[in-house]
Amino acid sequence: MDFIGFLIIILTTAGTIFFASKRIRAKYPPVFRKIAAIAKLRRAIGLSVEDGTRMHVTLGSASLTDPANTSALIGLSSLHRLGQLSSTSDQPPVCTSGNGGLTLLSKDVLKAVSVETNTRELFDPDHGHLTGITPFSYAVGAFDVLRQPGVNANVLIGNFGTEAGFFSITSETNTDFTLAASDSITAQSIFFATTRNVLIGEELYAIPAYLAYSPMHLASLQVQDILRWLVGGALIAGAILKLLGIL
């Protein structure tokens, strides 16, 4: 089993590098199914730039040493891309989180965006907030940022618990657009019941690719689709062989 897992990692890495190459991207451009919530996010980014309003991204409270931090890392990538897409506005995104490590990373991401887009004068370290170190103190502290007059769109990406309900309801009430995504089953169920634009399951990990963040993100999603077809084919083949009595 360890060998199979290692082989999958090698094949996935090789496939991602292969599809990320410029020649392959030109020959086989990625084609993905439409996800309505992400399409609305792109529209919200454009409206935010036009209206001179600000987007708020919140990353949850997972520790960087916790396996659940993968969703927060996706949130950081999305924050980076949102900053790039809204660089023509004088209102860069603001970010909140419930973990000190995520807060430091969010500040670094916002600084990197200001350097890349030549908007250093708009960078403010305070745009990356640590609003609380427990789930509910984090949620309550984030409300002050979310309710600011200039904030008109809210993106929830990360690991949340039951405090997800406070975020989603407050966001739906105080902003024009809310996108919610989490790797937590509890948070997904709450978001699905309280938010109009919610991503379910692995759709969370597709956000950077759908926002055209980098060739590696696009390639990784292509490899994920290929692996999904292979797993599905293996399951069907196994079922057929079982019915025929071969297995």
Image: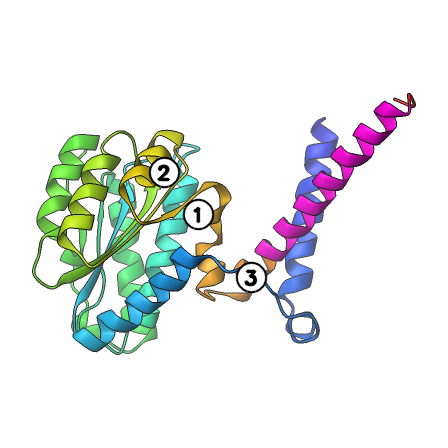
- The stretch of residues the image draws in magenta is 221-244
* Of callouts 2 and 3, the N-terminal one: 2
Kindly indicate whether the residue at mark 3 contacts the one at mark 2 (C-beta within 8 angstroms): no
Q: Is residue 60 left or right of residue 6?
A: left
Q: Which residue is mark 3?
A: 218
Magenta highlight: main SS: helix
| Label 2 to label 3: alpha-carbon separation | 24 Å
Kindly indicate whether the residue at mark 3 contacts the one at mark 1 (C-beta within 8 angstroms): no
Residue drawn at (23%, 62%), measured in percent from left and top? 93
Return the x and y of residue 139 as percentages of the image width and height.
Answer: 17, 38
Kindly indicate whether the residue at mark 2 contacts the one at mark 1 (C-beta within 8 angstroms): no
Mark 2: amino acid:
Leu
Q: Which residue is mark 2?
A: 64
Residue drawn at (27%, 62%), measured in percent from left and top? 110
Q: Which mark is residue 237?
A: none
Quadrant of the snapshot with the N terminus: top right
Q: Answer few, some or many: residues within 10 Å of disc 3's Cα (few below 14, many 20 plus, some between 14 and 19).
A: many
Q: Which residue is mark 1?
A: 204
Residue 19 visible in image: yes
Mark 3: amino acid:
Leu
Return the x and y of residue 70 as percentages of the image width and height.
Answer: 43, 42
Query: Does dot 3 land on a helix, a strand or a loop?
Result: helix
Q: Is residue 238 left or right of residue 156?
A: right
Quadrant of the snapshot with the C terminus: top right
Residue 130 visible in image: no
Mark 1: amino acid:
Leu
Q: Which mark is in front, 2 or 3? A: 3
Quadrant in the picture for residue 124: bottom left
Return the x and y of residue 213 as percentages of the image width and height.
Answer: 45, 64
